[in-house]
Amino acid sequence: MIKFENLSVTYPGGVEALKDINLEINEGDFLIIVGLSGAGKSTLLRATNNLVKPTKGNVYVDSKNVTTASKKELKKIRSDIGMIFQTFNLVNRSTVLKNVLTGRLSQISTIRSIFGLWPKDQKKLAFEALNQVEILEKAYVRASNLSGGQQQRVGIARALSQKPKVMLADEPVASLDPITSRVVMSYLKKINTELGITTIVNLHFLDLAKEFGDRLIGLRDGELVYDGKVSDVSDKDFENIYGRSIKSSDLIGEDD
Amino acid sequence: MIDLPKKPLPSVLTIVGIPFAILFSIYSFFQIGFNLEDFRTNLQNRYIVTDPLFNPKWSWAIENASAALVETIQIAILASILGCFIALPLSFYASRATNKNSYSYFLYKSFLNLVRTIPDLFWAMMFTVAVGLGPFAGVLALIMFSLAIMGKLLSETIDSIDPGPMEAAKATGSSHNQAIFTSALPQVLPNFTAYFLYIFELCIRASVILGLVGAGGVGRIIETQRIFLRFDRISPIVVLILVVVIGIEQFSVWLRRKIL
């Protein structure tokens, strides 16, 4: 489903965020990427939909080459990839519904989007997505009036409304408390199992990774240092990924 | 007794700058001919200035200046609306946050800077040449005036928006313009409204004097009456302008509080 081929990313200024990554992700996978901040997790995720351009190598999504895609092809590829963010990236002053409709922008003309002339079937998809994360009743509330957990669910709904084949989640729970974090992770897991959407999640909480993941990737200084089943990961492996012993701040802890 | 650190000497800029500023001010004082005595001598010609000034011809002013005053307000309304809405798309091109192309960014930014360096009365003079005397030239001049201020203020506001929502929109496969309209514009809309009301107030004041160069409005009447030294006709017009300007400013303040 997704293939990274000799992928390297060097940022202007010379920081090597990713070094020669080779990785294949199968359809329906629930993949978790762990690593310290700066290890290249976000870069890898953003290379998937070309928000970050590779310096070397290729990225394939659904057997289409993302790296060499034309502008038009790239839009098409991106419309099949949902993305959710650490800081939710909602337009705070707009309503929940408008935020979710962003997920449908690629399907309507610029003129229509400027004047907010949304066809009924497009709106229906947005409402359905809101219903899937059980926040439909907030459709006409301003995004800024929601709690953090609710905002992230709107973020998930925005991605869901795209009817994506792939879901990318960049530290989706880093700004949330433990209880809400588990709620958000459960939604992602549910979407993965029920809809079969290939999901990649960046996490830095090791216990959450163990709790929800199937497959786990470890990144250290831009290099792939672990790839295996979550059930097989030992504390030793985590220490190798982090390059140091595990601290309590690497764990989100129990609900209480 | 502790060793106190040595107090640093005043900088060269202070040593040279302050005496220079003082001397230059004194020189300018004499050069310009700053002389309060002039007030006294002029006010003594009471038949020409003071008496007519305090005997306003109200009926004449209302009869002859009302239409021009309305025209002044019309110029300001039309120009601030058109200018601000033309500036809206330009501002997004003149901001680094929404225009990643360095060349076109530089081009739009330079255009806005150029328009801003030219004073409003100068624009008015140029447009009276281009489209003839009258309020249309005034509207065009104030469009440039509004556009320049809005372009500057708004593009700088856009520079500091949260780029996150734009990235999110891009990630869904939307076009650049769609991302701007749905994710960047809502973030600056309150600022746009506030700037618009501010610019509208500036335009009201600016349009009063447009008539001095023949670009329409009440300024034209003031200019003709001033040539004939009819201060008895000018003073009521000035009072009328004052009332209207203060009234509109109060309305604008009220509106701003209501909206934001």
Image (cartoon, grey):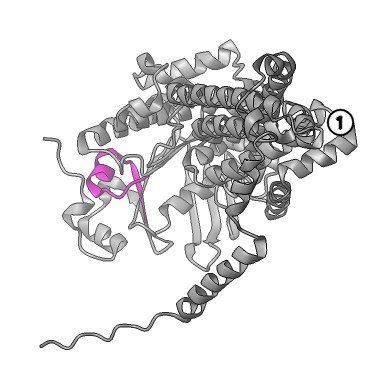
Does residue A19 appear in this view? yes
Relative to A126, is B177 above or below? below
Among the 4 quarters of the image, the one containing residue B57: top right
**Residue A208 drawn in magenta:** yes
Outermost residue on the top side: it is: A120
Query: Residue A76: percent from the left, percent from the top?
Result: 63, 34
Region of the chain picked out in magenta, as a range: A201-218
The chain letter under disc 1 is B
Going by the image, does A57 lie left or right of B129? left
- Quickly name the residue at label 1: B133
Going by the image, does A214 lie left or right of A159? left
Query: Residue A135: percent from the left, percent from the top?
Result: 35, 19
Is disc 1 surrounded by few (<14), some (14 to 19) or many (20+) residues within 10 Å?
Answer: some
Going by the image, does B108 lie left or right of B184? right
* Amino acid type, label 1: Leu
Relative to A123, is B173 above or below? below
- Tell me what residue is drawn at x 84 percent, y 37 percent: B127
Among the 4 quarters of the image, the one containing residue B86: top right
Of residue A200 and residue B71, the one placed in the foreground of this image is B71
Of residue A184 and residue A151, the one placed in the foreground of this image is A151
Q: Secondary structure at mark 1?
A: loop
- Tell me what residue is drawn at x 41 percent, y 30 percent: A156
Relative to A127, is A200 above or below? below
- Tell me what residue is drawn at x 68 percent, y 15 percent: B62
Among the 4 quarters of the image, the one containing residue B169: top right
Relative to B76, is A178 above or below? below
